[in-house]
């Protein structure tokens, strides 16, 4: 009885924990959990970015010590026609690839949401995404081959002429878009499908009672409420499209006649074919700035941080 009274007395005399002290303790726990991520970011992202910025101000061929040249690499970049051509080719690829993936992805997601929700079909959509890009490139090289490819055999059997899908300047980039989109469109469709599942079913039931068609329901309900997912997919697709490298390295190697020499492949050539690491760093840093501006504009224009569902 005496012990219980003493315990009660200690409890009542103990000073209550202030909100400020609780916040300080929560902050320490948060820092402990975030520490591995912060260290990883500093080692694998921040330090290489600082080193890359320094190398962009030097003349370095990997064999000798970097020699400081100031802004010379950036001046060279401005007058480099291949750099501007690679930006133009990259922009062409980004527009074709992102538009194709968004359109096909949202159509597939709508069919999944409104027609069938089969788990088998959803699994099949992910299969191409699981195939490595190098393997997909080799597979499509065989399918699109000008002499032995399946598609040219199909064209000849229909009475048409052989087409150099990967050797014609006009067809090479659309063919690369087809290869890369084949791998990624299923994943994009599932992202849209997940966003559609978050839309309350009562809205569709009300639209059906009012007699709205499927097309009107899509443009008045589905598409507006899908805006945050659309912004996310658009930003991720754009960044992924700008980083195209492995498909080009396997299939066309920048040809024919620079028709598929995208900026990442051009940076690789400058760094590891011509050993101009300083110039390649300046190209990479310029690309980061361009991507940052485009991403910021996309997020602002699409109001990605707000949702009409809230």
Image (cartoon, rainbow, N blue to C red):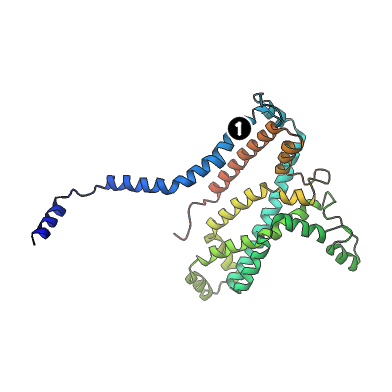
Residue 28 coordinates in the image, percent (x, y): 36, 45
Question: Eyeballing the image, is 308 above or below 123?
Answer: above
Query: Residue drawn at (13%, 57%), measured in percent from left and top?
Result: 8
- Which one is nearer the viewer's eye here, 129 or 76? 129
Query: Residue drawn at (86%, 55%), measured in percent from left and top?
Result: 164
Residue on which disc 1 sits: 53
Residue 75 image-quadrant placement: top right
Residue 84 coordinates in the image, percent (x, y): 73, 37
What number of labels is visible? 1
Assign the N terminus to one quadrant of the image: bottom left
Query: Residue drawn at (82%, 59%), measured in percent from left and top?
Result: 142
Residue 213 in sight in this render: no
Query: Residue drawn at (69%, 33%), measured in percent from left and top?
Result: 277
Residue 9 in sight in this render: yes
Left or right, 102 with reference to 152: left
Question: Eyeballing the image, is 296 above or below 161?
Answer: above
Residue 78 coordinates in the image, percent (x, y): 71, 31
Question: Eyeballing the image, is 308 above or below 241?
Answer: below
Question: Eyeballing the image, is 128 above or below 206?
Answer: above
- Which one is nearer the viewer's eye here, 266 or 233? 266
């Amino acid at each position: 009885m005496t012990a219980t009274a003493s315990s009660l007395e200690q409890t009542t005399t103990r000073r209550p924990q202030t909100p400020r002290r609780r916040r300080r303790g929560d902050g320490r726990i948060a820092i402990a959990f975030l520490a591995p991520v912060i260290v990883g970011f500093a080692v694998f992202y921040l330090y290489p970015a600082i080193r890359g910025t320094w190398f962009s101000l030097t003349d370095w061929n990997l064999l000798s010590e970097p020699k400081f040249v100031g802004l010379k690499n950036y001046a060279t970049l401005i007058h480099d026609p291949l750099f501007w051509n690679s930006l133009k080719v990259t922009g062409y690829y980004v527009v074709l690839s992102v538009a194709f993936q968004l359109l096909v992805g949202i159509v597939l997601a709508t069919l999944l949401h409104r027609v069938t929700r089969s788990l088998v079909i959803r699994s099949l959509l992910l299969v191409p995404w699981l195939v490595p890009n190098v393997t997909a490139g080799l597979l499509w090289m065989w399918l699109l081959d000008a002499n032995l490819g399946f598609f040219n055999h199909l064209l000849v059997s229909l009475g048409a002429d052989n087409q150099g899908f990967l050797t014609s300047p006009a067809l090479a980039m659309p063919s690369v878009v087809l290869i890369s989109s084949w791998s990624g469109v299923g994943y994009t469709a599932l992202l849209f499908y997940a966003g559609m599942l978050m839309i309350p079913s009562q809205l569709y039931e009300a639209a059906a009672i009012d007699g709205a068609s499927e097309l009107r329901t899509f443009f008045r309900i589905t598409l507006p409420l899908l805006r945050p997912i659309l912004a996310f997919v658009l930003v991720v697709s754009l960044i992924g499209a700008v980083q195209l490298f492995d498909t080009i390295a396997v299939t066309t190697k920048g040809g024919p006649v620079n028709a598929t020499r995208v900026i990442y492949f051009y940076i690789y050539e400058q760094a590891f074919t011509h050993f101009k690491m300083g110039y390649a760093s300046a190209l990479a840093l310029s690309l980061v700035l361009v991507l940052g501006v485009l991403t910021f504009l996309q997020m602002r224009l699409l109001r990605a941080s707000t949702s009409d569902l809230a």
